[in-house]
Amino acid sequence: MAEIASQKETEAMLERMLTRLALTDDSKLEAVLGKLLPYAISSLSNSIPSTRQKVMEMLTHINRRVKDQPAIHLPVLDLWKLYQSADSPMVKNFSIVYIEMAFDRLHMEEKINFAPELLNGLSKLPGQHQDILLRIVAQAMECHSNQIDEAVAAKYRKINVAEECHLLLGFCLQTMLYQPPSSNTEGMTCSAGLSIVQTRRITGKYPLKGEKLSGRKLGILNVIESMNLAPERVYPLYITASIDSQESVTRKGEELLKRKAASANLEDNALINHLFSLFQGTASEERIPAEERITPASPALQARLMSVFSHSVQAANLFPATLRCIFHCIYGNGTNSRLKYAGMEFTVWVFKHASMEQLKLMGPVILSGILKFLDGQVAAESDVYSRELRAFSYQAIGQLAQRAPQLFRGNVEMAVRLFQALKEVDPSSRSTVQEAVNSLATAYKDCNELVSKGLEALLLENSQVVESEARFCAVRWATTLYGLDHCPSRFICMLGAADTKLDIREMALEGLFPQKQVDRTVNQSSQSVPDNYPPLKEILDYISKYQPQVLEVSEIGERKPLFPPKMYVAMIRFLQICYEAECHQASLSARGDSPQHADSVILLCLLLEHAMAYEGSVELHATASKGLLNVASWHPQMIASRYAERLPWLRQFLGHIDSDTRESISRLLGITCSALSTSSASVLIQELCSTFKVLNKGRFEDSHGAICATGYVVSQCMTGMPSVGRELLETSVMVLVDTIKSQTLPLAGAAAEALGHVGLRGRLTDFGQDYQFHNSCQPAEMEPLTKGIHEVKPSMEEVSGNLSNDGFVSSLIERMKELLGSNDIKVVQKVVIAFGHICHGDTSLRLMDMALDALFSLSRSKVEDVLFSAGEALAFVWGGVPVTADEILKSGYTSLSTSSNYLTGEIAPHRFIDSTVVETEVVRNDRAKAREKITKKLFDDLLYSNRKEERCTGSVWLLSLTTYCGQHPNIQELLPAIQEAFSHLLAEQNELTQEMASRGMSIVYDLGNSHTKSELVQALVSTLTGTAKRKQVVKLTEDSEVFEEGSIGERPGGEKLSTYKELCSLATDMGQPDLIYKFMDLANYQASLNYKRGAAFGFSKIAKQAGDALKPHLHTLVPKLVRYQYDPDKNIREAMENIWRSLMADPKKTIDEFFDDIIVDLLTQSGSRLWRSRESSCLALSDLLQGRKFDQVGKYLERVWITAFRAMDDIKESVRNAGDSLCRAATSLSLRLCDTSLTERSDASAAMAIVLPFMLSNGIMSKVATVQKVSINLVMKFAKAAGDAIRPHLPELVFCMLESLSSLEDQRLNYAELHAESVGIQKEKFENLRIAVAKDSPMWETLDLCLKHVDPPTLELLVPRLVQLVRSGVGLNTRVGVARFISFLVQNVGSDIKPFINSLVKVLFPAVEREKSSAAKKAFAAACGGLLKYAGSAQAQKMIEDSIALYTSVGDKGTQVASAILLKTFSQQAADVVKGYHTIVLPVVFMARFDDEKEVSSLFEEVWEENSSSESVTLQLYLPEIVAVLCDTMLSSSWASKKKSAKAVIMLAETLGESLAPFVQDLLKFLVKEVPGRIWEGKEVVLDATAAICQACHRAISGDDPVGPDILVTLVSSACTKKKKSYCEAAFRNLEKIIKAFGKPEFCNMVLPFLLESCTQNSSGKVDHGGSSLDGSSAEENGDLLPPLGKVLDCITSIVTVANLPDILEHGKNMIAAFLNSLRPELSWQVKLSAFSTIRVFYGRLRVGPSQASSISSEQAAVQQTLITESFQSLSPLVLECISSIKIAQVHLAACECLADMVEVFCSAQKTESSLYRELLQLYNVEKNESAKSVLKKSLDILEDSFKDTMHD
C-alpha cells in the first residue's frame, strides 16, 4: 500500500510539474527546467508504465518548447551528475541525449571548461555514449582553433588513463581523416581512411563542412599539442593533418609534425603497425561487415606514409604488410605516378634493410613484380615519373642483388637485361641504372664456369659499345668479379685504359695495377713483385688470339700499332709485371733453359717491337723500348743474339724524338754489341762516331742518340766482348772528349755521360797520351778510325807504364768544370755523375783531387737536383757503392737515388760492394786520401758553416755517403760524428736540410750498434720532450741569417731583416741595444721548434725499428706526441703525425693506455705562457674527450671546463678558436654523461654534480659573453636531457636561472628604460617588452624544463630558495621571473604546495605592496592567486582580508593598486574561493570603483566586473554590507574617503532607485551630517549624493518623515550661501533636483525669497555667470562671492514649476525684477538662456485657463492680469534686444520661443499694440535661422489674430 501511495504521489507530482511547465512563460522556462528536467529524467528509473508515460509527455513538451529557442539553457551539470550516478540504462540514455542538447546551448566559456570533465571515465561507458561524448568534446575543441588557455590545457593533461587517451586520439584521428562529401554525392559515403560507421560516428546527425570542420580540426591539434603526449602516439594524427585539404590545417599539421613529433621513434612496432593499418584499411577483408570496412587512406596520405616507411627499418620487416603496401603502390586501384614512385623507393629501402628471413620470403615475389612492371613500361617514354620509376626499379634490383645474390647467380639473364637497359634508358636515368648494374656484380661472384663464360662475352662486348656507362660497368665488373690472374678480365681492363672517359681509364688502370705500380722499375726487389698475376704465356696467348698480327715479325718502317696507344702502354706495363713475376719465380739457372719461357720471351719481344710502329705515341715508344731493355737485362744473351741480326731495325730508333727512347735503345745496342763480331762492332763504332763528329751537321736527336750509343758500345767493347782494337777505342774516346769541347751544351753533357760510362769499365787516363784538344773535328780525322782495327791490343804492362797524361786529364777536368757553371741543370747533373763514374774506374789521386775540387765548387748551389747528383758522385769517389758497372750499363738504372728510393720513400738498405777486385797499396792510399778530403770538407767547412746553403749542401752530401756507402768501414767509424752532425742540423730552418738530417738519423740508427741506437733514441726523446741541449752551436757572423727573410717584417725603409748584422743595426737605430737579445731569444725559440720538427722526422724513421727501446720513454713521449700533432705549425704537425703512425700500431689502444698521462699534460700545457702550447692543448683535448666514459674523465671534468672557459677568453684569436672547439667537445661529452638514457644513472648523477654547479657558479656568472652563452645553453640542454637526475640540483639551478634573467640582460635596456618616457614610450609598455624578451630567453626555457621535474621532496629545498629570491632579488626580469615561476610551480604541483603556502605568502604579499613596477606587481599577485586556490579556509580568509586592508588602510596609491591587482587575480584564478568572501570583498570593491585615482578605480572596476554578472542584482544581493561600508567610510577623517563614498551612494541611487529605500535613512543621516561644516575639496559630491537619494527615494523619505524634505531643502539652501564657487554652484544645482524630486508647493515660500534675494544681489555687482568680474579680478578678491545667476534661475524655474499660483502671484513683482536683472546686456548669453527658460515657465503658470479661472479669486485674477501686463511691457523689449543683438543661434531660438509664449499669454489676456508687430516683422525679415524664423512667424500670427479680434470688437 505504501508503494502504491508513493507511486500516486510521484504521478501527482509529475502531473503538477507538467501543469506548471505548461503555464510557465518562455521567459521563465529556463529556471523551471533547471529543476524539473533532472527530476523528470531520474523518474524514468521507475518501471511503472504510467509514470514513464507521464515523464515522456513532459519530455515531449519540453522538446517542443525548447526546440526553436536555442537561448533557453538546460541544466547540463545536473544532467551530467545524474548520468554519472544513475544505474538505470534508460536514465543514462535520456541523460546523454539531453546533455548533448544542453551542450549546444552553453556559452563558449562554459563549453570550454565543461568538455574535459566528460573524458573522465570515458573508457568505462558504452560505445554509443562514448561517441556522443567524444562528439561533444570535439565540438568544444572548436573554441580552441586559435589557441588554448593554459588552465584548460591543464585539465586535458590530467587525463592520464591510457584507455581514455587512446579513445580520444582515435576519435581525433578519425575526425582528421574526415573530408566533407561533394555536393553531387548521393547516399551515405565515407572519407578515405574511414568506414561508414566511423563517418557516422564523427558527424553525428549533420555532416561537417567548411569553416566548422577546419575549426574543429585546428582545435583538436591545439588541444592534443597541449596534452604533451608521447611523439609516437600523436604522430599518426599530425601526419594526417599535414595532408588535409584545408591549408590552415595542413600548415598546423606540418608545424606540429616538425616541432612535436620529429623525435618520434620510427622503429616503434606499435606506431608502424598503426601507420600500416591506416595505409591499407580493411576494405579487402570480407569477414568484416560492409559498413565497418575501413577504406584505404587517401593517395596523398599514402604517399606521405610511404616516405615515413622509407625511413623505418621496422617497416621493412613487417611481412606481409610490407608486401601488400608495395604492390598496392605499384599495381593497386587508384594508384598514381607519385605512389608508384614512393612504392619503388620503399622497395629499395626494404631490400636494403629487411632481415634475411624477411627477404627470403619477400624477395622473389617483389622481384617478379618489378620485372613485370618493367616489361610493361615503354623504354622511350618521356614522362619524368615513368623514367624515375624505372630508375627506382633498377635500383631495387641492385639492392636485392647485394642482399640475396642467390636469386641471380644461376644465369646471366639479369646481367644481360641490365646492360641492355643501360644502353637503352634515357641518359638522365643511366646513373641510377649504372649503380644497379654495379650492385648486381657482387651477385655473380664465384659463379659457375658456364655463367662465367657468358659474363666474359657480355663484358667484352659492352666494353666496346658507344655508351660510356656500359663501358664503365663492364670494366667495373671485370675488376670486381675476377682477380689479376684472369686473362679475359685483364684484357677488358686494357681496353678500358684507352677509353675517352677519365673515370673508366682510372678504374681500368686500377684493375691492372692495384698496387699503384704503373711506373715500376726493373730494379725493384723480388718482395715487391706480386705473385698473383697471370702466367705470361696465358696472357700473351689471349692477346694474340684477339690480335693474331702480334705473332708476325715487325719490319722496318711499320706504321700503325696493333692496339690504341694508351691501351698498348697499359698492356706493356702489365706484361712487364707478369714477366718480372715469372722471372723472379724461376731459378736463375733455368731462365734460358725452359723452352716455354723462351717462347714467351720471344712473343713478348714481338709485341714490344710492334709497339715501336711509326704512328705510335711517344709514351708508347718509351714504354716499349724500356720493356725491351728490361727483357734484355734478364736475358742479355738471348736479346743480344736476336737483335744482332736486326741491328738496322734497332738503330732506326737512335734518332727518336724522345730522349728516354733514345737512351733505352742505346743501352739495348750496347747489350747487342756483345753478340756482334769484331768487324761488325768496329763498323758500328765508326758509324756512330761519324754521326756526331761533324760539327753542327744533322739532327740533334741523331747526334745525341749516337753519342749515347757510342758510350754504351765502347764500354761493352772494353770488356773484350767483342774484341776491338785499342786505337779504335782510344779514337772513340777522343771524339767524345772533343765533343765536350766543341758541341752544344746538351751534346757536351751527353758526351760527358758517355765518357763516364766508358770510365766505369776502365781508366780514362790510359787514353789521350800526347792528346791535345781540338776546336773542331775535320772529316779527314776520321781516317784513324779505319786504321788499326785489326792491330793488336797493347799489353797491360805497356798501359800501366804510361799512366795518365796530366795535360789530358787537366784539360778534360777543366772543360767539365766549365760545364758545371752551365744553366742547364740536366747537363750539370750528367757532368757531376760523370765525375763519379770516372773516379770509380780510375783511382789516381791527381784525378780524384781535381774531380773533388770540381764537386766542392758546387757547395753553395741552391739547386737540389745538382746537390743530390753531387752526393752520388762523392759516393762513387768514396767507394763501396751498392751497384756494379753491369747494373749501370745493362739495365734500366738511372741513378743511385732512384734505386734506393732516396728521394721518394723509405731508404732501402744497401749491400757493400767493393768494385775494385784488386787494389794496390798506392790505390788504397789514394782512396784514403780522397775520403779524408771529403770528410774534412764536410765536417770542417760545410756542416757547421755559418751559411745555410753550405749547411744544406753538407747535409745532402753526408746523407748520400751514409746511404750509399753506409757499410763501408770508414763510414762506420764516423757514425758518432755523423749522428752529432745530423742532430745539429735538425734545428735548421731550411726544410731540405731538416729533412736530410732526419733521414740521416734514421740511417745512422740502422747502421749503428746497440749503444749507438740507445743514445740516438734517448737524444731524440729528449728533443721532443724539450729537455735536450745542443752540443755545438754555429758561430754567428755579420752575414749569418738569423730569421728567414720576411718572417719578422721589414725595416721602416723597406730593407730586409734577416741577418745578424741587420738585426744589430735595427736595435742600434731604435736606441735599444738590448733588443738584440730579444731577437736572439726569439730566434732560439724558433730553432727549438725546428729542432723538434726535425727530430720528429728522424724519430718517425727510427720508431719502427726501435721497438722495446722506446717503451721506458712512452709515458713522457706519448703526451707530447699527442699535443704536437695539433701544433699550429704545419711542419711540426706533419712530422709528429709521422712519428705517431710509425710508433703506434694501435693508436686508440695507446691513447687509452696513457689517457691519464695525456690529459694531465694537456691540462697543464693549456695554461702555458706559450700560445702555441695553449692552442694545441685545447685542440688535442677536444679530440681526446670524444666518446669517453665517466670513469675515465670524471676526475678531470671540472678542470676541462676551466681550461675551455679560460681559452675562450684568451688574448690570441687562434687560441680562442681552439677554446671554442674544446668547449663544443666538452659540451657534447657533458651532455652525454648527464643523459640518463645514455649513461648509467649513478654516473649521470655524479657528472651532473660536477658540471652543473660549475656552470652555475663559474659559467653563467662569468663576465665573458661567450662563456655566459655557452653555459646557459648547456644548462638548458642539461635540463632537457638529464631527466630526474637534475632534481638534486633544481634549487640552485632555478635560483641561478632566475637571477640570470636580469644579470644577463642587455644593460642598454636599463638605459633605454630611463629615457623611454622622454621619447614618448610608456614605461609599462617598455617593461612588458623587456619581460617578453626575457621570456624567450634560454634561461626561461630552462625554467620551464625544470618545472617538469619538481616533486614534493624537491619542494622542501626549492621553496626556501624562492623565498630568498623574492626577498633579495633585484632586476625587473628576475622579480617577474620568480613570481611567474611560483605561479607555474603551483599549477604543476597542485595540492603538494599546501605546506609551503604560508612561507610563500609572507614574502609575496609585501612584494606586491612595495613593488614599483606594475608588471612585477601583477606577477607577484598572480603567484598569490595561484596559492589562494590551494590555501586552507583560514589562510584564504587572511589573504583576502589582507588584500582588502591594503586598500582600506591609510596608504599610498601603490598599496591601493596592489589591493586591486590582488583581488582581480584572486577572482580570476580562485573564483570559487573568492565567492565565499563576496560579502567582505564586493562592498569595498564597489566603493573603490569611485576612487579619485583613475588607475585605481579602473582596476577595481575590472574586479567588480569579474565578480558580478549583473550590477543591479549584485548590488541588491550585497546592499546591507555595501551600505555599512559606505557609512563607515563616510565617517572617515579622510576627505577622499568621504568623496568616493558619496560617489558610491550616487551609483547606488541611480542603479537601485526605490530598492534603496530600506537604507535611505541611514545614508541620509551621514550625508546630512556632512553637508554643514567646513568645505573641503570635492565636498560637492556630498550634495550630489543627497540629491541622488532624494530623486531615487523621495516617496520613502516623505513617508518616513513628512518634514524630512523641508529639512533637506533648508540644509541645501544654506549650502547655497557658501563662498566657494564650485560648492555654491553644486548646492544650487542639487537644490533644483531636490525641489523637483519632492515637488512640494510649500518650498515656494521657503526658498523663493532667498533665490530672489540672490538675484537682487547680482543686480548690484558686475559678476557674470562665470563668476569673474568685468574688470578681470575674481569675485573672491572683490569681496563676498555672488551666487551664480544661471543656477539661481534654474532653481527659480523648479520652484515656479511646483509652487501654487497664489504664491507665484505673491512674489510676482520680485520675480519680474529678477528677470529684468538677468537680461542685462552685460551678462553672458548662458545666463540669458536660463532666464528665457524661467520666463517661459513663469508665463506658463500665468496662462489663464478654464480650470485656473475658476480656482482663483477675482483679486488674484486682477493681480494676475497686472503681472502679465507689467512683465510683458518690461521684459519684451529686453527679449527683442537679445534677438537683435546676440548672434548665437541657440540664443535666437530660445529668445524667440520665450517671446512667442509671452505674446501668446499677453494676447490672451488683453489687446496688443501694433508697434510690437512692426518690430517683430522687422526681426522676422532679417532673421536667417530657419527655426527662429518659424517661431517669430508664430508670434506674428498670434498678433495678427489679436488684431483681427480687436477690429472685430
Image: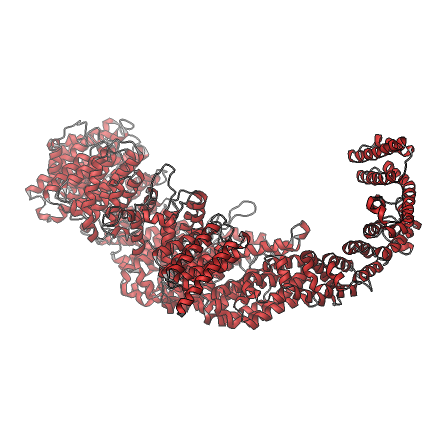
Residue 1135 appears in the rendering: no
User: What colouring does the structure picture have?
Assistant: secondary structure
Residue 198: image x %, image y %?
34, 49
Residue 1328: image x %, image y %?
59, 55
- Residue sitting nearer the eye, 1491 or 903: 1491
Q: Is residue 726 above or below residue 1129?
A: above
Taking the image as shown, residue 311 lies to the left or right of residue 1392, namely: left
Residue 765: image x %, image y %?
24, 42
- Residue sitting nearer the eye, 308 or 665: 308
- Residue sitting nearer the eye, 1729 or 1501: 1729
Q: Is residue 634 above or below residue 33?
A: above
Q: Is residue 871 above or below residue 1159?
A: above
Taking the image as shown, residue 782 lies to the left or right of residue 1155, namely: left
Quarter containing the C terminus: top right
Residue 6 appears in the rendering: yes
Quarter containing the N terminus: bottom left
Count of labels shown?
Answer: 0
Residue 932: image x %, image y %?
31, 55
Taking the image as shown, residue 1121 lies to the left or right of residue 1301, namely: left
Residue farthest to the right, as pictured: 1660
- Where is residue 1505, by image quadrant? bottom right
